[in-house]
Image: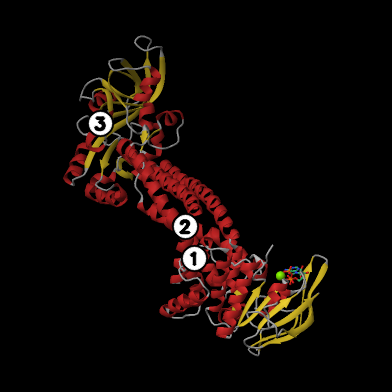
């Protein structure tokens, strides 16, 4: 469903060139719950950004739905993200002036879905992520965990091909982080949505069905985890 | 689009402090603009009015030779058939007043004056019965009374009176030359002091009865000018040509100059002033721009991450831009409306109470035909203009930071620091 083929990416900062990814290849199948792990600076964010069409690789190919995304325009990429990719960010990134409900429905209103349907789907999903009764609160009236639940709902509302989460629990305490992971796993099971998340936290890795270890921009190991929690 | 408007409104009401401060900066500029415009237009209109009411009238009939030597105030180029001209004008329904204008030296002596002295002055010989049909001096008497026909009385401009220490009842001698060039002294008594809104009159003018002047100056019934009041001074040129037609054979010896021709220097000055006041108004806008763009800049920079997130979620750049610019337009609308209210309040003050400029105008001749209290005028077109300029300013000052934000890589705006 999604494929990375010998993907390379480096950054130029002044005189020095940082090789963030040095030839990464793997594929992701529908419904996978997969973690990309690795120490700081190993290239996790860089890789997720490339899969999420937020950035372009220097060489190699990324295929989404067997379409390579190398020569799309900015506008086409925006459309692709809008329809097929959900993001969950480390620092939640909710729009502060919008309520939980509006933050979620916003993602759907970009897709020309009828208003009635937007409302129904949003309310159902907010209930599923455990926010019944808090639909009309603003982000600053919600705890970090609750905000991240809104973010999960926002990523899922459009039934995306894949949800990408860059260190989704890094800003949460371990108990709340684990709850978010359980929620993501539950959604993965229920809707068969593909999740890819990065982390360097062992607890988080324990939930993944599949684990890719990155080191210095290269895949060190890529293995299934039959004993995954959740 | 509906969502974007909703979103913009949410942002405006949520960041209330910022909305209020930015709108206030804008409102201040807009209000000041409306006020300044009101004042400048008020001065211009009043200048024009005072020029016509006290100086030029709508248009003036004079001998064809007069204009070339007008600076010498020559008596030899007089209109000798004034009765016929006046009758024709009367039949045509045009108000008119004959005048003879001459130059003279005013001589005063110590006691009752503070000291001996003489001063050059422009003397208007006016018909006390007809002059008020065209000019407005009757209402400008601040002390004493208006002229009576045949008397040796004189009206004196208030600033001139103050300068030489004159008062009602004081004697005043005018040395001049008759129509034929002989020296003549006219001994008069001050009967009234004139203080009109036209500083040119206040500063150096004297008025005596026309028939008195006629005999002293040997005018033999001639007058140097006949001033007319038109129903609409804006159409002075076309009415003048109609008048010339009506005068028929009488028009052979005379010509008509409209107030615009009579005060060409004033008109030129007014045009120059409206240019320089344009620069002044521009300055006010620069102040508003600086005030607005500062907060706008901050507001957008602060939300770079939000901007990046919106793009990550698949909003197109133009949609993101529209969202932010709509918000700025909202501030523009609020600021402009508040500015117009502020402007109306300031206008109200300056239209009803005015600003007293007497001392400034007295010391410095600025070419304005106004003195005393200046009043503004309502100018709705300036308000409408200001409204749109306000919105434009707000949107323009958000444009640059939004453009910058959109230029950044999405990944850079989202990076955790
Ligand atoms: N925009 C950038 N400009 C320059 N260098 C960058 C940029 N983004 C990433 N890098 C560098 O590329 C390498 C990989 O960075 P990346 O952010 O992908 O690592 P990471 O695994 O996500 O690390 P962390 O766990 O700290 O988030 C690092 O050495 C980083 O300094
Ligand atoms: Mg990272």
Q: Return the x and y of residue B344 as percentages of the image width and height.
A: 36, 47
Q: Nearer the viewer, residue B123 or B314?
A: B314
Residue sitting farthest toward the bottom: A66
- Label 3 SS: helix
Above/below status of B304 relative to B348: below
Residue A98: image tag: 1
Image quadrant containing the C terminus of chain B? bottom right
Question: What whole-number distance in Å separates the C-alpha atoms at marks 3 and 1?
Answer: 67 Å
Q: Badge 3 is on which residue?
A: B139
Residue A196 point in image, percent of width and height? 66, 79
Image quadrant holding the N terminus of chain B, namely bottom left
Q: Which residue is mark 2?
A: B331
Q: Identify the subunit bearing mark 2.
A: B
Chain letter of mark 3 equals: B
Image quadrant of ligand 2 equals: bottom right
Badge 2 element: helix
Name the front one of labels 2 and 3: 2
Q: Does dot 1 land on a helix, a strand or a loop?
A: loop
Nearer to the camera, A201 or A97:
A201
Query: Which one is closest to the eye, mark 3 or mark 1?
Result: 1
**Alpha carbon separation for disc pair 2 and 3:** 50 Å
Left of B332 or right of it: where is B415?
right
Front-most of residues B267 and A170: A170
């Amino acid at each position: 469903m999604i494929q990375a083929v010998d993907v390379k990416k480096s950054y130029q900062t002044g005189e020095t060139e940082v090789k963030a990814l040095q030839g990464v290849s793997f594929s992701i199948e529908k419904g996978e719950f997969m973690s990309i792990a690795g120490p700081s600076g190993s290239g996790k964010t860089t890789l997720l950004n490339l899969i999420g069409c937020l950035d372009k690789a220097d060489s190699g190919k990324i295929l989404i739905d067997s379409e390579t995304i190398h020569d799309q325009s900015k506008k086409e990429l925006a459309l692709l993200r809008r329809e097929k990719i959900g993001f969950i960010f480390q620092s939640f990134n909710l729009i502060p002036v919008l309520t939980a409900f509006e933050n979620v429905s916003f993602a759907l209103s970009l897709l020309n879905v009828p208003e009635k349907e937007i409302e129904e789907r949003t309310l159902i999903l907010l209930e599923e992520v455990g926010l019944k009764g808090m639909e009309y609160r603003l982000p600053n009236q919600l705890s970090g965990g609750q905000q991240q639940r809104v973010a999960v709902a926002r990523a899922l509302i459009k039934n995306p091909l894949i949800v990408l989460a860059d260190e989704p629990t890094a800003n949460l305490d371990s108990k709340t982080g684990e709850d978010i992971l359980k929620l993501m796993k539950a959604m993965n099971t229920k809707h068969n949505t593909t999740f890819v998340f990065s982390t360097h936290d062992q607890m988080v890795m324990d939930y993944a069905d599949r684990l890719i270890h990155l080191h210095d921009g290269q895949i060190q190991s890529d293995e299934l985890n039959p004993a995954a929690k959740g | 689009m509906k969502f974007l408007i909703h979103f913009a409104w949410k942002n405006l009401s949520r960041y209330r402090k910022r909305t209020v401060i930015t709108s206030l900066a804008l409102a201040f500029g807009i209000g000041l603009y409306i006020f300044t415009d009101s004042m400048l237009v008020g001065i211009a209109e009043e200048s024009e009015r005072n020029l016509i009411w006290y100086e030029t009238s709508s248009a003036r009939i004079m001998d064809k030779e007069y204009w070339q030597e007008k600076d010498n105030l020559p008596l030899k180029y007089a209109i000798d058939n004034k009765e016929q001209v006046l009758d024709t004008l009367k039949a045509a329904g045009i108000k008119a007043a004959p005048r003879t204008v001459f130059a003279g030296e005013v001589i005063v002596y110590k006691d009752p004056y503070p000291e001996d002295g003489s001063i050059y002055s422009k003397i208007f010989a006016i018909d006390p019965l007809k002059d008020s049909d065209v000019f407005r001096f009757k209402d400008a008497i601040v002390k004493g009374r208006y002229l009576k026909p045949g008397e040796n009385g004189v009206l004196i401009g208030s600033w001139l009176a103050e300068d030489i220490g004159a008062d009602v009842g004081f004697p005043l001698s005018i040395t001049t030359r008759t129509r034929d060039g002989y020296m003549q002294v006219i001994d008069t008594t001050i009967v009234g002091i004139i203080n009109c809104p036209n500083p040119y009159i206040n500063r150096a003018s004297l008025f005596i009865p026309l028939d008195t002047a006629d005999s002293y100056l040997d005018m033999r019934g001639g007058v140097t000018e006949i001033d007319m009041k038109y129903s609409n001074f804006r159409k002075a040129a076309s009415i003048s040509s109609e008048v010339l037609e009506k005068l028929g054979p009488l028009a052979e010896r005379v010509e008509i100059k409209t107030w615009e021709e009579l005060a060409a220097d004033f008109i030129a000055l007014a045009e120059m002033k409206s240019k320089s006041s344009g620069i002044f108004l521009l300055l006010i806008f620069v102040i508003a721009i600086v005030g607005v763009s500062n907060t706008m800049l901050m507001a957008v920079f602060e939300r770079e991450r939000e901007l990046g997130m919106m793009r990550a979620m698949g909003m197109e750049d133009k949609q993101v831009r529209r969202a932010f610019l709509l918000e700025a337009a909202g501030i523009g609308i609020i600021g402009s409306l508040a500015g117009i209210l502020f402007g109306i309040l300031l206008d109200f003050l300056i239209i009803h109470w005015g600003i007293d400029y007497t001392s400034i105008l007295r010391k410095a001749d600025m070419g304005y035909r106004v003195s005393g209290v200046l009043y503004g005028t309502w100018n709705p077109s300036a308000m409408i203009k200001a409204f749109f300029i306000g919105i434009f300013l707000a949107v323009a000052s958000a444009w640059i930071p939004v453009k910058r934000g959109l230029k950044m890589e999405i990944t850079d705006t989202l990076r955790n620091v």
